[in-house]
Amino acid sequence: MKIIAVANQRMGVGKTAITLSLGMALSERGLRILMVDLDPQAALSAACGVEEAQGASLANVLGGSGPGTVEMRDILKEVYPGHNCYLAPADLELTLSELGLNFRIGRESVLEKALETVSKEFDLAVLDCPSALGMLAVNALNSAQAVLIPTRPEIADLRSIELFLTVLERIKKEINPDLETLGVLVTYYNRELGPHKAAIKAMREAGLPLLEVGIEEGDHEIEDQLSEMSRPIDIPGDPRTRTQLAKLVEQWLAGWRTWQPSITES
Ligand SMILES: Nc1ncnc2c1ncn2[C@@H]1O[C@H](COP(=O)(O)OP(=O)(O)O)[C@@H](O)[C@H]1O
Ligand SMILES: [Mg+2]
């Protein structure tokens, strides 16, 4: 099982929407997918119809200052019938887990060990990270082989991403030298807006590894579609983007060490 973390400490950049779209798109394409909700706000879980996972969430698997009491395998929920797409749900209790983890020996590898117990059952795990740089995010970045970084096309986000990339370098240096940056994925893009274009230009000039594929701003709330679960979820905007994104991940899965994120020219 390979592991991709969808991460950025900024809130509302589309991490959860991308995790879900990617999970569903790749499971439709035949991969066995595990989506992991690492956010105590549990937006991904709610989107998948798990409103409260009390007693059977990632919090119970990870534990806190002491080990967890539940096996990873026992909390998994099938969320996309007919496809191999499962969810490890979150719960508000994850906040307490995170606090406790700070005092735990081996605290950075707790998630990695939990994921190992199900690694034969899945091809890919997609980790929906919380919008913060605490122990949960560190655990995600320590267990992942690659990180996908969604961002809004705004100047304020440039600084935020630079900070995030600095943290990534530290993670690589200290605990996970093999972590690859899949790329920075621009979301909520509106081609009519000059400031968006200017921000993307500035991001490119700053040397950020922008991906060729970007996600446009959509006008619908993703949650609305999710509760129904009647049809596959599209990332808001151009539906083709979802496929492009899935192909990009497949390319990474196939190309492993030779991966080079390409930088958009237009
Ligand atoms: N490209 C997009 N265009 C419009 N709305 C979007 C887009 N991507 C996500 N959203 C919506 O924006 C909100 C925040 O997205 P979310 O994925 O929860 O961000 P994060 O997980 O980074 O906090 C959600 O309501 C989601 O449905
Ligand atoms: Mg989220």
Image (cartoon, rainbow, N blue to C red):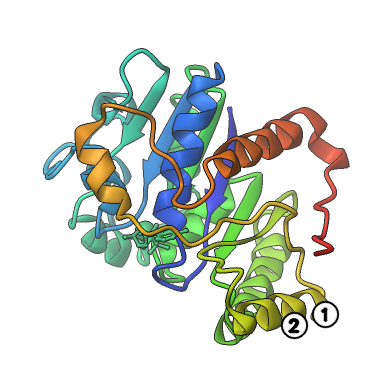
State the image coordinates of residue 174 (x, y, percent, origin top left): 68, 64
Q: Is residue 66 visible?
A: no
Tell me the kind of residue under disc 1. Glu
At x 24%, y 60%, the residue is: 41
At x 52%, y 59%, the residue is: 7
| Image vertical order of residue 196 relative to residue 213, above or below | below
The quarter of the picture where residue 96 lies is bottom left
Total labels drawn:
2
Label 1, residues with CA under 10 Å away: few <14, some 14-19, many ≥20: few
Q: Is residue 181 visible?
A: yes
**Residue 103 or residue 84, whichever sits in front:** 84
**Residue 86 or residue 68, whichever sits in front:** 86
- Which of the image's four quarters has the N terminus? top right
State the image coordinates of residue 236 (x, y, percent, origin top left): 44, 51
At x 88%, y 40%, the residue is: 258
Label 2, residues with CA under 10 Å away: few <14, some 14-19, many ≥20: some
The quarter of the picture where residue 34 lies is top left
State the image coordinates of residue 77 (x, y, percent, origin top left): 26, 27
| Image vertical order of residue 212 relative to residue 10, above or below | above
Q: Is 63 displayed left or right of 35 in the figure?
A: left
Query: Residue at label 1?
Result: 205
At x 45%, y 57%, the residue is: 15
**Residue 171 or residue 9, whichever sits in front:** 9
**Residue 228 or residue 83, whichever sits in front:** 228
State the image coordinates of residue 171 (x, y, percent, origin top left): 64, 64
Q: Is 63 displayed left or right of 119 in the figure?
A: left
| Image vertical order of residue 125 relative to residue 194, above or below | above
Disc 2 to disc 1: CB gap under 8 Å: yes
Q: What whole-number distance in Å separates the C-alpha atoms at marks 2 and 1?
A: 5 Å
Q: Residue furthest right?
A: 258
Query: Residue at label 2?
Result: 202
- Which of the image's four quarters has the C terminus? bottom right
